Image: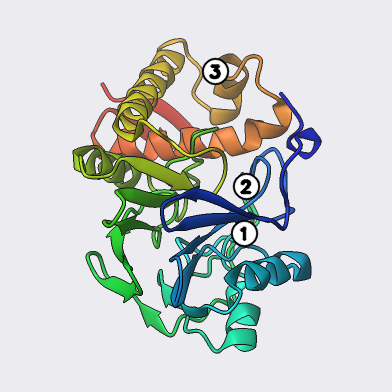
């Protein structure tokens, strides 16, 4: 696997990636964030929105403000509250007076192995957006699309003026999203993917990590298929007599960096919980079995 920190990336620079959309990349590369968190500035003049301000790093916040220039920040918007997405919201609001508008706060005590940073306990929005609610500025509108699954408070934001959708960690071009219980929910995640697949009006996705997705519905269809294949793989592991997640992972993730196995195990756990809800498997004492 390529080390993301070895990839040449335009940190602390504003790049025009589409109509009304610029991107500023935070210097927090890792096997789980790819080259780093991508903060998006929406708007051409007058006022702008900042989506996923990222980690609380001075270089990154200064780069956002430099990219903003003389425009007013009308809203600081977070897709969810993992610590690689929302911590810069508070200092950015303090320096600009801009309101924090978007996903609901969520703090979860979770010491298990994660594929992403833990939750941001300091996130305090001035306004929480419900599904379908919008924020508007000079020539732009951002509409909240509730997409729980990766986290229960995850939102995507649609920009109808251009057909863009900001997908946070729900859909990424470089990797599948980890769904980690207890807050991550595979049933919700699959329903949210199906919701996005039905949205034919979205022509490009801008994820928080990785490249833009130019064929979004094709990718989402593939992601749904991938998850269904993973589900079948888990059922085959149970048929083979492997009843604990730790016994399944080496067989399911051959060739995958073993540092990622704990996170993979949490996604497998999310699949098993979903299968149990559907009466396909049963569990007792951390052992899983096919339902007779």
Q: Residues within 10 Å of mark 1 (few under 14, many from 20)?
A: some
Q: Quadrant of the N terminus?
A: top right
Q: Position of residue 119 (x, y in %)?
A: 58, 64
Q: Quadrant of the C terminus?
A: top left
Q: Secondary structure at mark 1?
A: loop
Q: Position of residue 7 (x, y in %)?
A: 75, 34
**Closer-to-camera residue (164/188):** 164
Contact between labelled residues 1 and 2, with CB atoms less than 8 Å apart: yes
Number of the front mark, 1 or 3? 1
Q: Residue at x 27, y 28 (%)?
A: 280
Relative horizontal placement of residue 11, taking residue 18 as reference (left or right): right
Q: Secondary structure at mark 3?
A: helix
Q: Residues within 10 Å of mark 2 (few under 14, many from 20)?
A: some
**Closer-to-camera residue (117/184):** 117
Which quadrant of the structure image shows residue 204? top left
Which quadrant of the structure image shows residue 123? bottom right
Task: Give the residue pinned by disc 3.
Answer: 252
Task: Give residue 114's mark.
Answer: 2
Spatial CA span between label 2 and label 1: 7 Å
Relative horizontal placement of residue 272, taking residue 66 as reference (left or right): left
Q: Residue at x 38, y 82 (%)?
A: 127
**Closer-to-camera residue (214/2):** 214
Spatial CA span between label 1 and label 3: 26 Å
Relative horizontal placement of residue 18, taking residue 30 as reference (left or right): left
Q: Position of residue 128 (x, y in %)?
A: 36, 77
**Closer-to-camera residue (19/120):** 19
Q: Secondary structure at mark 2?
A: loop
Task: Give the residue pinned by disc 1.
Answer: 118
Q: Residue at x 48, y 46 (%)?
A: 207
Spatial CA span between label 2 and label 3: 18 Å
Q: Position of residue 10 (x, y in %)?
A: 71, 47
Count of residue discs: 3
């Amino acid at each position: 696997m390529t080390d993301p920190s070895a990839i040449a990336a335009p940190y602390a620079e504003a790049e025009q990636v589409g109509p009304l959309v610029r991107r500023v990349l935070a210097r927090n590369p890792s096997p789980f964030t790819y080259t780093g968190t991508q903060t998006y500035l929406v708007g051409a003049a007058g006022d702008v929105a900042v989506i996923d301000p990222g980690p609380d790093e001075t270089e990154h916040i200064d780069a956002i403000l430099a990219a903003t220039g003389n425009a007013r920040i009308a809203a600081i918007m977070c897709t969810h509250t993992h610590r690689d997405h929302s911590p810069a919201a508070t200092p950015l609001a303090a320096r600009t007076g801009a309101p924090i508008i978007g996903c609901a706060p969520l703090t979860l005590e979770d010491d298990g192995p994660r594929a992403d940073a833990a939750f941001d306990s300091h996130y305090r929005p001035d306004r929480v957006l419900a599904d379908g609610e919008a924020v508007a500025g000079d020539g732009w509108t951002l509409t909240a699309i509730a997409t729980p699954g990766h986290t229960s408070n995850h939102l995507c934001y649609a920009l109808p003026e251009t057909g863009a959708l900001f997908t946070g960690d729900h859909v990424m071009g470089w990797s599948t999203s980890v769904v980690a219980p207890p807050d991550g929910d595979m049933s919700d995640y699959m329903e949210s993917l199906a919701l996005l697949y039905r949205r034919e009006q979205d022509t490009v996705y801008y994820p928080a990590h990785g490249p833009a997705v130019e064929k979004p519905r094709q990718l989402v269809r593939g992601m749904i298929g991938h998850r269904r294949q993973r589900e079948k793989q888990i059922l085959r592991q149970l048929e083979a007599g492997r009843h604990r997640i730790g016994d399944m992972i080496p067989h399911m993730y051959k060739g995958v960096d073993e540092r990622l196995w704990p996170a993979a195990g949490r996604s497998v756990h999310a699949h098993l919980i979903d299968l149990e809800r559907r009466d396909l498997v049963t569990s007792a004492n951390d052992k899983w079995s096919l339902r007779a």
